[in-house]
Amino acid sequence: MNENLFDVVVIGAGPVGENVADGAVQGGLSVAIVESELVGGECSYWACMPTKALLRDAAALRAARALPGANSAVTGELDPAAVLARRDAFASHWHDDGQVAWLDGAGVALFRGVGRISAARTVEVTDAVGHTTVLKARQAVVLATGTSARVPHISGLSDAAPWTSREAASAQAVPGRLAIIGGGVVGAEMATAYAALGSHVTLIARDGLLPAVEPFASDLVAETLKAHGVTLHLAAEPTGFRRDEARTVQLTLVDGTTLAADEVLVATGRTPNTATVGLDHIGLTPGDWLRVDESLRVLGADGTPVGDGWLYAAGDVNRRAPLTHQGKYQARALGETIVARASGALVDTSPWGRHAATADEHAVPQVIFTDPEIATVGHTAASAEAAGIRVRAVEYDLGAVAGAALHADGYTGRAGMIVDEDRKVLVGFTVVGPDVAELLHAATIAIAAEVPIDRLWHAVPAYPTISEIWLRLLETYGRTA
């Protein structure tokens, strides 16, 4: 057999590509995977893992200081060097040997280089020295190339050598002054991390802080950031940048305010990694986001699958739900879909079917690791209203729950749920407070399973735990008929 002929060729060896490859191999198909950087992708080296490692030490220290007995044992301050060293370990020191070994063990062939579609079911891989290898796919080509940080066109910004999320996640020193442009998840988390590490942080956010979450959650994070010395310029935007002879970045805001920083982090969104994958050979525009159908087949300009449906896209690049765990969820469904189509088996893409990524539309969970944490799944009140759902929103003071009061002195937090009043099921949940991340999966299950409110009354939370918030929310909502 021609060694460059495979059942499936995957471009992109991040978590999404790896999971597609694993699912296809488990189903008996041969798989090649193409990667131009590190096997393991953005999440392993420049996002999920290193950023959470940057945040964890400070969170643990805050937790200890919220209890009088533990606080008396805390005699020192956070050690930035130790935090960065632990971060380096979680990023595998930016070596992918372990991930490559996993691919080898799984029976997935790795080709290093830039992958580019050159014809139907054909991928050309150009390596670092310019050598090109041609891979042919019997069944499918999968684009799992993810996204990169988007740097806006603002006067002087590129010359100021700004950080993106990659530099923020991998920095080997803590800047004395850090300016962050953008108030989304990356901006808010890195403001939390670097303020704890000793930077004087200034955050500039045209659209406000964490605008996609419930206001009660973003407001509490804003209050805490300010209490930690972060300067917030909300409803503001920069108009110019200049890095002077002393390497200081001078920023000018639209209202004329001037600021100085040692580094500037740009966290203003993402752009799809599709500029070099050969979209022009299939009638699409390089650099565009990819539209997909219910089975993740890439759609052409006419809205039908490319060719006879041999091209798929999973993960952030299809813009359905740009989170690592949702990309892996898509990848698991897609791996099985490709196997099913290869064998002639039925493909079930009906809502909540085996090969459908239905949760992308109804039950997307996310944890924002700020201080305090925000955990959310499904709709907010605003997004439910925009979707035309007749809802009722209820909230409750999380600090009034016995388990939270035991968890930390002065515990401050809030929770809210969104109920579809026509179906009497939960469609959204948000909670903000210290260490609330582990509360999220119960809400995710309730929303994905469409558990009726009446049945949720019978899911009794253990006392005294923070999960008792469910009982308090249901009491606030009131019993249904």
Image (cartoon, helix red, strand yellow):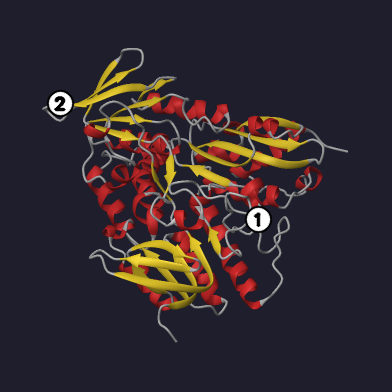
- Horizontally, residue 83 falls left or right of residue 32, namely left
Residue 13 appearing in the image: no
Asked which quadrant contains residue 329, the reply is bottom right
Depth check: give the residue in front, 50 or 65: 50
- In the picture, which quadrant includes the N terminus? bottom left
Report the mark closest to the observer, 1 or 2: 1
Depth check: give the residue in front, 466 or 14: 14
Label 1: few (<14), some (14–19) or many (≥20) C-alpha neighbours in 10 Å = some
Q: What element carries label 2?
A: loop
Q: Do the residues labelled 1 and 2 touch (CB within 8 Å)?
A: no
Residue 107 in the image: state x and y as whole percent: 44, 78
Residue 188 in the image: state x and y as whole percent: 41, 34
Residue 268 appearing in the image: yes
Which of the numbered marks, if any, corresponds to residue 294? 1
CA–CA distance in space, label 1 to label 2: 51 Å
| Residue shown at the point (74%, 31%) measured from the top left | 392
- In the picture, which quadrant includes the C terminus? top right
| Residue shown at the point (50%, 49%) measured from the top left | 323
Residue 251 in the image: state x and y as whole percent: 27, 22
Kindly identify the amino acid type of the residue bearing the numbered disc 1. Glu
Kindly identify the amino acid type of the residue bearing the numbered disc 2. Asp
Residue 45 in the image: state x and y as whole percent: 34, 54
| Residue at the spot of label 2 | 244
- Horizontally, residue 203 falls left or right of residue 94, namely right
How many circles with numbers are drawn on the protein? Answer: 2
- Horizontally, residue 198 falls left or right of residue 413, namely left
- Horizontally, residue 389 falls left or right of residue 293, namely right
| Relative vertical location of residue 379 with respect to residue 346 in this rendering, above or below | above
Q: Is mark 1 on a helix, strand or loop?
A: loop
| Residue shown at the point (26%, 20%) measured from the top left | 259
Mark 1 or mark 2, earlier in chain: 2
Asked which quadrant contains residue 103, the reply is bottom left
